[in-house]
């Protein structure tokens, strides 16, 4: 047929173009993919934040007020000493001398009693009603007697005796004016000046026979200051 060579040429040209296209595609440099941006540097992983412990609340300080000084117990008012029986036979009130405030031992201590001088062996009387609480032998007082009054507020002290009255004993209730002993110079008394050392003291709540507040017996025995 008159158009067959032309067709063959067209087919060959198409095949050649196709082959060329294939070769061009195969030989074309493959474009590299666009570079991805480098990953952002990662922050170092920090351990979970641990909350710092809250500071302890300030200690509550209880305001400790300085305690008010405890007031010393008020001194008990001096007990009223009744009029007493004169303790030494033959001695009158006008013969008494107030030696309560005299010093002793170079004024290192007070006398806190009165001395009633009389011959050795002169009877000594109880000045008031009350029990004999202690018969005591001491170095300074010698042969002594402690008697309480009937109310237990006062103690009467008789010292430097030569002897006790016969039958006298502790716990015995004595009547005012009863003989309880005899004047002497026992203890630290001057042997050449026998006398009765007589004292009164107000007892404390403990009722200690050896301890109390000294009271001057001078006026209770009828003594008069000249």
Image (tube, rainbow, N blue to C red):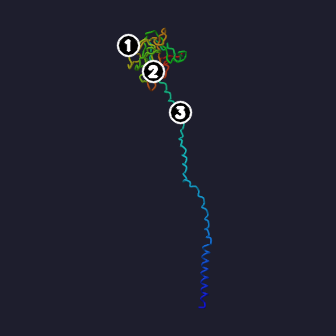
Q: Which of 213/28 is in front?
A: 28
Q: Which of 71/183 is in front?
A: 71
Image quarter where the C terminus lies is: top right
x, y (%) of residue 41? Answer: 60, 58
Numbered circle sitting on residue 166? 1
x, y (%) of residue 197? Answer: 47, 15
x, y (%) of residue 157? Answer: 45, 18
Mark 2 neighbour density, 10 Å: few (under 14) some (14–19) many (20 or more): few
Image quadrant of residue 28? bottom right
Check the image and report above or below for 8 versus 142: below
Residue at label 3? 69
Mark 3 neighbour density, 10 Å: few (under 14) some (14–19) many (20 or more): few
Q: Secondary structure at mark 3?
A: loop
x, y (%) of residue 138? Answer: 45, 16
The label nearer to you, 3 versus 1, is 3
Which is nearer the N-term, disc 2 or disc 3? 3
Relative to 171, 68 lies left or right: right
Do the residues bearing badges 2 and 3 touch, measured as CB atoms within 8 Å?
Answer: no
Residue at label 2? 210
Q: Secondary structure at mark 2?
A: loop
Determine the CA span between mark 2 and mark 1. Answer: 24 Å
Judged from this view, the residue extending furthest toward the bottom is 1
The label nearer to you, 2 versus 1, is 2
Mark 1 neighbour density, 10 Å: few (under 14) some (14–19) many (20 or more): few
Image quadrant of residue 122? top left
Judged from this view, the residue extending furthest toward the top is 192
Q: Residue at x 53, y 33 (%)?
A: 69
């Amino acid at each position: 047929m008159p158009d067959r060579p032309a067709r063959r040429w067209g087919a060959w040209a198409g095949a050649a173009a196709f082959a060329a296209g294939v070769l061009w595609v195969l030989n074309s440099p493959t474009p590299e993919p666009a570079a991805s941006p480098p990953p952002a540097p990662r922050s170092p992983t920090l351990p979970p934040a641990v909350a710092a412990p809250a500071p302890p609340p300030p200690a509550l300080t209880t305001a400790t007020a300085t305690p008010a000084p405890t007031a010393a117990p008020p001194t008990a008012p001096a007990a009223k000493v009744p009029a007493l029986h004169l303790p030494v036979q033959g001695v009158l009130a006008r013969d008494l001398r107030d030696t309560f405030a005299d010093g002793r031992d170079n004024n290192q201590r007070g006398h806190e009693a009165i001395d009633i001088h009389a011959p050795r062996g002169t009877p000594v009387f109880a000045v008031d009603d009350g029990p004999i609480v202690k018969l005591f032998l001491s170095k300074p007082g010698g042969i002594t007697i402690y008697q309480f009054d009937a109310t237990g507020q006062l103690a009467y002290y008789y010292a430097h005796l030569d002897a006790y009255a016969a039958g006298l004993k502790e716990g015995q209730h004595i009547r005012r004016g009863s003989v309880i002993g005899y004047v002497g110079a026992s203890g630290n008394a001057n042997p050449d000046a026998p006398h009765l050392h007589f004292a009164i003291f107000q007892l404390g709540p403990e009722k200690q026979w050896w301890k109390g507040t000294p009271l001057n017996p001078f006026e209770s025995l009828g003594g008069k200051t000249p």
